[in-house]
Image (cartoon, grey):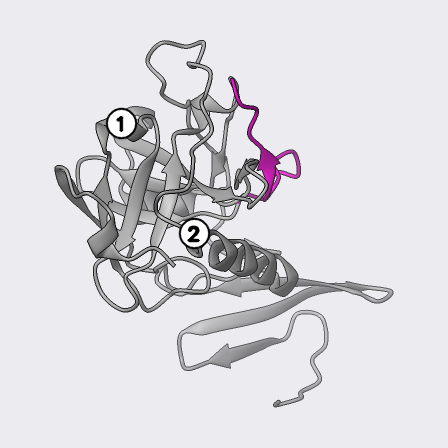
Amino acid sequence: MLILSRKSGESLVIDGRVIVKIIRTDGDTVKVGIEAPANIPVHRQEVYEEIQKANREAANQAPLAKLPSLVKPKNTSGSTPLKPANIQHQTKIV
Amino acid sequence: MSSVAEIEIMKAMEVQLPLGLLGFENIKTYSLTSPPDQEPFSWLTMSTGEGLAFLVLPPAFVLNDYAPDLSNDDVNFLEIRHPDDAMILNIVKLRPNGTATVNLKAPIVINRHTMIGKQVVLSQSAYAINHPIQSA
């Protein structure tokens, strides 16, 4: 693991295309900003690992397992409303 | 493990996940099949690699007011211009005791025109990775 020290306002560049900026430090919490191309998703590690584990558990299934019978949705179109968030800046703050 | 040969292939739609699923990032092409006797469930099956299949469900069958917040990055990546462009499917986990849960925290959002999708991890804390499905 490469270990570097940075102060607030300083950045790291990974592979020439991912920029990690230290926005602010507050006690033992660091606010980090990440600029990355769209094909490089960025996640908090523990969240990533939880979803990865859930996906892997869901992939191991008997194809003929009994499926739960479900109630029909109340909205007849069965579609889910989508609301894009109002994030204005390009830097993702995590 | 579900194998492709054991799933009756009805009309299959190809779905591209350029970033794969979390934990399966190298598998980018899937087949979406909806056997009529398993409605409203569908199967999202890997076209390459291990040929694993994921049972998926439109979230409206589990809760009425699922409202995933997509970031501008996700909206742009998927080229979603209007909410109707998006098809949302959530992965279902069947447990040996006959219960099932659905992953509301990381839906698969597909642009229904391009059939390009992405597994989006929502930042909303209201949605669980293992949300129980109530049987009718």
Task: Please name the residue shown 60% across and 36% down the image.
Answer: B131
Amino acid type, residue under disc 1 in the picture: Asp
The residue closer to the viewer here, A52 or B17, is A52
Chain ID, mark 1 = B
Between B35 and A20, the residue placed more toward the observer is B35
Q: Is residue B16 visible?
A: no
Task: Identify the disc placed on residue B37.
Answer: 1
| Residue farthest along the right direction in this orientation | A27
* Secondary structure of the residue carrying numbered label 2: loop
Q: Name the quadrant of the N terminus of chain A.
A: bottom right
**Where residue A65 appears, x then y in whole percent?**
41, 41
Residue A49 vertical placement versus B79 (above, below): below
The quarter of the displayed image where residue B29 is located: bottom left
| Residue A6 in sight | yes
Q: Which residues are magenta?
A: B122-136
- The overriding secondary structure of the stretch rendered in magenta is loop
Q: Amino acid at mark 2?
A: Gln
Badge 1 marks a residue whose secondary structure is: helix
Q: Which residue, as the protein is rendered here, is positioned at the far left?
A: B11
In the picture, the disc for residue A57 is: none
Judging from the image, mark 2 belongs to the subunit labelled A
Name the residue tied to disc 2: A61
